[in-house]
Image (tube, rainbow, N blue to C red):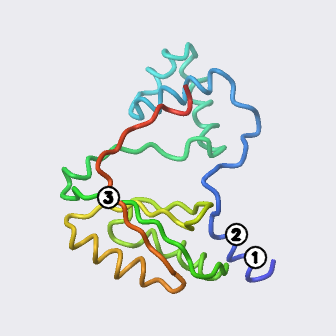
Amino acid sequence: MAPEDRTRSAIPRTPHAPLPSRPLDEIDRAMLRALAADGRISNAQLARRVALPESTCAGRLRALREAGVIRGVHAEIDLAATGLPIEAMVALRFAGHTRQSMDSFRERIAAVPGVIAAYHVAGDDDFLVHVAVASSDELRDLVLDHLTAVEGIGHARTSLVFERIPGTRALA
């Protein structure tokens, strides 16, 4: 494997897991819906909810994790309650589209204080960066010191988030 191929493969380029070895059935989907609603549900409760023996449920859950279908279970945090009441989406556009500049940005962005997530997108912009900060001054500094200071960024547009409206779960 050439050095550049190793570098490329070390940087995940997709938010999607590879397809599981078997198609998801209705029981798998019911398990996923239950976990999406309550990630803290016990295996015993989950097994009852989907009408499976506990050992079978645990095995299916393990298989879903190993296949990458379940990538983690997370707490939903009220950012304002943690002292970060200002959320924004920062749209970034690169002046040129070299693999080196994109890869460099992708490697750095997760370590920037205040970044919740970054999305590599198609369209006019190249990345959308979701950030949370304590003040408008911190937002300005984050954008100027950490986002637009990145080599290759040609344009940035910041939009304040007034309200986050949860969507329906994809596993209806």
Question: Rounded to the nearest whole Å, what is the CA distance between mark 3 and mark 2?
Answer: 34 Å
Q: Amino acid at mark 2?
A: Ser
Q: Horizontal placement of 108 versus 56: left or right?
A: left
The residue at 65%/78% (across/down) is: 97
Sequence-wise, which precedes: disc 3 or disc 1?
1
Q: Measured along the vertical axis of the image, is residue 37 above or below residue 124?
A: above
Q: Which residue is mark 3?
A: 160
Q: Position of residue 107 (x, y in %)?
A: 53, 74
Quadrant in which the C terminus appears: top right
Single out the mark in the foreground, 3 or 2: 3
Q: Which residue is mark 1?
A: 5
Q: Measured along the vertical axis of the image, is residue 35 above or below residue 52?
A: below
Q: Quadrant of residue 133?
A: bottom left
Sequence-wise, which precedes: disc 3 or disc 2?
2
Single out the mark in the foreground, 3 or 1: 3
Q: Measured along the vertical axis of the image, is residue 107 above or below residue 170?
A: below
Quadrant in which the N terminus appears: bottom right
Q: Amino acid at mark 1?
A: Asp
Q: Measured along the vertical axis of the image, is residue 160 above or below residue 100?
A: above
Q: Secondary structure at mark 2?
A: helix
Label 3 Cα crowd, 10 Å radius (few <14 / some 14-19 / many 20+) = some
Q: Secondary structure at mark 1?
A: helix
Counting labels gives 3
Q: Amino acid at mark 3?
A: Leu
Q: Horizontal placement of 111 versus 30: left or right?
A: left
Q: Position of residue 29 (x, y in %)?
A: 60, 26
Residue 9 disc label: 2
> Which residue occupies the foreground of this view, 158 or 19?
158
